[in-house]
Amino acid sequence: MQPHLVAWQGGESRWSFMLRAITVCVGLPRSLLQLQPDVVVSANEQLYDTLPGMLLKLWYRRRVRWAVVAHNIPAWRFWQREGHRWFQSLAFLVSERLSLLVAALGANHLLAVSPATTRQLTALGFPERRVTTVPCGVDVAALDAIARTTTERPYEAATIMRVSAEKGIFTLIDAWKLVVAANPTARLAVIGGGIDMEAAQARVRALGLEDNIDFLGLILDTTRAFTTLRTAKVFLHPSYKENWAIAIGEAMALGMPVIAFDLPELQEVWGEAFRAVPRGDSSAFADEVLALLADEPGRRDLAQRGLARVRSLDWADIAQREIQEITGNRS
């Protein structure tokens, strides 16, 4: 597979989603215009993915079928978005709605990654015939191989996330402070980068948790990232807003028990395959972590339930289904 790269020097900021949209339209790689594809897929419903999709469809004079994968549609009540100023959330909402308008004008199909996203799209006026619910997935065999060869357990817990308030980084830090109060040597690994990294590290220093929380940054080598993740006993996912949470599926495929907030969207996807705690409750989160760390049979049972759930979500099967939906060749 040949990558077609757009130069991006904007870094991570709360305005980067708009800057990326401008960058990809101005600097769309010429190699893309020589592909003669049959199918174009925008991997996200944001402008920096939908605008190139629309441009490619116009370039090829509608010969291609264009699909947009829809993940997380922001609510109209933009001022309630966690960890963002109201004008930033308003800009994000406007950008998302413009992106969905682009998709409405040109996309042949929208692939919604959860039933909740499907309901949101149809409520916005997208015809049901153009929207299909398709699950996210994991490379089950690859993650199982990593799980079988990783035995070291230096971390009590780990997470892989976009480091931002909306993804729960500050709640996680506060919860880990309570875990450390009961278990002073408990260590947490945080894999990933994001707009609130500096603020999160400052919070860790202020709470005196430098020896208990390791920020490992963005690990682009997926084998190394998942091997590192598997060195923890428990996977934590404190996100305030989700629709499917692919990181949860990856952790389950690694044989890790999962703790996350009790969001309706996660309950709809994962059911009883994870431990749910009240949204935003750092004390309850810490209590669940401590309880699970002290209960090895409970961890094994929860991990087995996760494995059973995720084994039906292999990427190869899901990709085949998506191609059939996009091209109309349903068996």
Image (cartoon, rainbow, N blue to C red):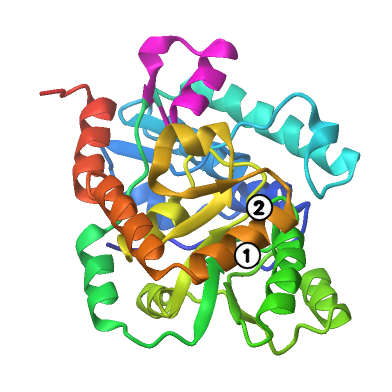
Please state, as top left, top right, bottom left or bottom right, where the C terminus lies in the image.
Answer: top left
Type of amino acid under label 1: Trp
Q: Residue at x 37, y 34 (%)?
A: 60
The image position of residue 100, as x and y in percent, is 59, 26
Q: Secondary structure at mark 1?
A: loop
Please identify the quarter of the rendering in which residue 226 is found.
bottom left
| Mark 1 vs mark 2, CA separation in Å | 7 Å
Q: Residues within 10 Å of mark 2 (few under 14, many from 20)?
A: many
From the viewer's side, name the closer residue of 287 and 303. 287
Examine the image and state in which quarter residue 236 appears.
bottom right
Q: Nearer the viewer, residue 115 or 206?
A: 206
Kind of residue sitting beneath label 2: Arg
Q: Is residue 113 visible?
A: no
Q: Which residue is mark 1?
A: 8
Residue denoted by label 2: 20
Q: Residue 282's image quarter? A: bottom right
x, y percentage for residue 99?
A: 61, 31
Q: Position of residue 284 (x, y in %)?
A: 68, 54
Q: Of marks 1 and 2, which one's residue comes earlier in the chain? A: 1
Highlighted magenta segment, given as a residue range: 111-132
Q: Left of 29 or right of it: where is 296?
A: left
The answer, for residue 142, to whether it is visible in the render is: yes
Task: Tell me whether the residue at label 1 lies in contact with that at label 2, contact meaning CB atoms closer than 8 angstroms.
Answer: yes
Q: Is residue 10 magenta?
A: no
Task: Judge whether 106 appears above or below 244 on screen.
Answer: above
Packing grade of label 1 (10 A; few <14, some 14-19, many >=20) is few
Front residue of this view, candidates 328 and 111: 111
Q: Is residue 306 left or right of residue 324?
A: right
Give the number of the disc on residue 325: none
Residue 199 on image: x %, y %: 83, 70
What residue is drawn where x is 40% and y is 70%?
296
